[in-house]
Image (tube, coloured by chain):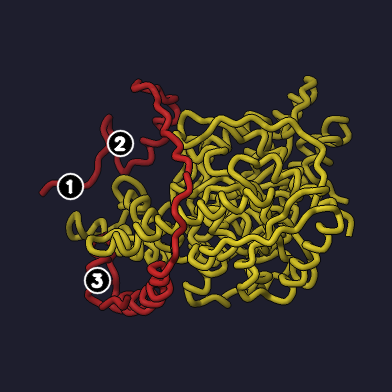
Amino acid sequence: MNVNELTIAEARCQLDSGQLTAVELTSACLRVSRKLNKKLKAYLYIDEAGALKAAEEADRRLEAGERTPLLGVPFAAKDNIMTKGLPTTAASKMLGDYIAPYDATVIARLRAAGAVLLGKTNLDEFAHGSSTEYSAFGPTKNPCDQTRVPGGSSGGSAAAVAADMCLFALGTDTGGSVRHPAAFCGVTGYKPTYGLCSRFGLISMTSSTDVPGILAKSPADAAIVLEAIRGEDKHDATTVRSKQARPKPFSWKGMRIGVPKEYLDFKLAPSMRSAFDKTVARLKKSGAVIAPIRLPLTPYAVAAYYIITPSEISSNLARFDGLRYGHRPKKAKDLQDYYLTAREEGFGPEVKRRIILGTFALSAGYVDAYYKQAQKVRDGIKTEFDSAFKKCDLILTPSTPGPAFKLGARKNPLAMYLEDVFSVPASLAGLPAISVPAAFKPLPVGIQFISPLLSDDMLLSAADAYHTLPG
Amino acid sequence: MPLSSEDIKKLGQLARLKLTDKEIAQYRTELGGILRYVDQLRTARIPKAANNKVVATPWRDDAVITWPDDERLAALEQAEELNEQVKVKRILA
């Protein structure tokens, strides 16, 4: 086994015992990243010099006797997360030559913990998409089958973890952007409770649902990373104070697993259906109690999401006008033309589509019928989850309708939006959720656990117990 | 709800997006399809809000936070022209 294939927990033992150095581990990840990236395009930027320097520093700390969970562990970060001194493009021509002047809080915390940043990963432009095909710099390919998409929008991060180009990666999840690619690439994708991890330094998309998320090789690894990045941040007023719950031994005995009928009414690919049914059977066998629950607003979640999200996008992306931020056009007749040309040249088709849709949903005469109605549905979805969690401890759903699709297969934007059908409800309600692989053949598919607000530690323990459940 | 080409053009102006005729036609069809789907929101039966906890917005001190100089300068250096002041395009006629 090559060292880049290790989990964080495994690498920790070897780093702490002196069997492996951070420089060796980082070099192994860099070697594989360089080699595979030509085909996979998981990374938009690999920072070899910076990574090796950070690894040397980690080795010095190890030699001095420091023993901390992420010291010397190499990771990748999605390119819509600010990384000081490095390109941060959001996979858009609009920010093609932008260098982040500061670190996002999650990056600063990982660096302080001694984790080694390898580079920046590909995404759908501004994280708008579910396949990473909307990147202005070309699509990422799925490491399990290079004719297929890795999912999105954190497709580069998921592919980098799946191909062992790093030990873990950061993504962002607004409506499923960490869970969806994790399911497609066969890795763990965890979206924390809204407010548990700081959004400071994430390029804003939908401020009311954006969260930083973790792509890892196991839920236990995701829990290690969460410990380093969680907690209040004075730069993000929506963050909440939260300490890790004291670890309790987890048991499925008596755990009430809610299975919402409405999720299973959707058309599922046969491999997803069978992996889901097997999961239910395995959990039952382990002593869990399966509780049928109802979440009747589920079929409306995508519609509400695709009004709320474009609305916030139309407002958040107004700052990219060529003056305050972004691409500067060479030629313009007057100021108005300067703005128009900057945005015409800088934004790709999906970004424009969402800006126009959001502008419509917020415009006079339509705001009540669309934006306000979508917010009412969102409140209803929260209320339904609250009622459901009186009858169960965890909710189990498929992560996606099916496995990774072929590159270019989702030409219709609405068909792409419906990829998020199982992930958006938890995002709208701010709930923690995690996708874990449920089957790997013929292609990976994932199952999703959703749990009550701020019960992230229990969620990760449950996901890890599922991950390590025998056959 | 169907959108006309004029609607798309108007939205483009509001959003400061220059759109070609081809884009107008494309977005008209695509957004029409999306809005037909979204229109189902009107039929949603919304449960009475139980008691969705409203999280109070935390307050912070009304004080200047000093930012590290290197980061402030790194941000300023990306300006088109920097000479004690940031030069931008004239915005008042």
Q: Nearer the viewer, residue A415 or A74?
A: A415
Q: Amino acid at mark 2?
A: Leu
- Residue type pointed to by label 3: Lys
Query: What residue sits right under mark 2 in the picture?
Result: B82
Q: Label 1 to label 2, Cα distance in Å?
A: 17 Å
For chain A, the rendered hue is yellow
Q: Which residue is mark 1?
A: B91
Q: Nearer the viewer, mark 2 or mark 3?
A: 3
The residue positioned 47% from the left and 44% from the top of the image is B51
Real-space CA distance between mark 2 and mark 3, rounded to the nearest whole angstrom: 36 Å
Dividing the picture into quadrants, the one containing residue B32 is bottom left
Chain in red, by letter, is B
Residue A163: numbered disc? none
Chain of residue at mark 1: B
**Tag 3 subunit:** B
Tell me the element at label 1. Answer: loop
Q: Is residue A328 left or right of residue A103?
A: left
Disc 2 crowd, CA 10 A, few/some/many (<14, 14-19, 20+):
few
Which one is nearer the viewer's eye here, A15 or B86? A15
Up-down relation of residue A213 to residue A440 (above or below): above
Q: Which mark is residue B9?
A: 3
Q: Quadrant of residue A426?
A: bottom right
Res A141 seen here? yes
The vertical placement of A221 against A345, above or below, is above
Q: Tell whether label 3 touches label 2 (CB within 8 Å).
A: no
Disc 3 crowd, CA 10 A, few/some/many (<14, 14-19, 20+): many
Residue A257 position in % (x across, y down): 72, 54
Mark with earlier residue (2, 3): 3
Where does the image place residue A65, in percent across and percent down from the top left?
80, 21
Residue at image position (44%, 54%) is: B48
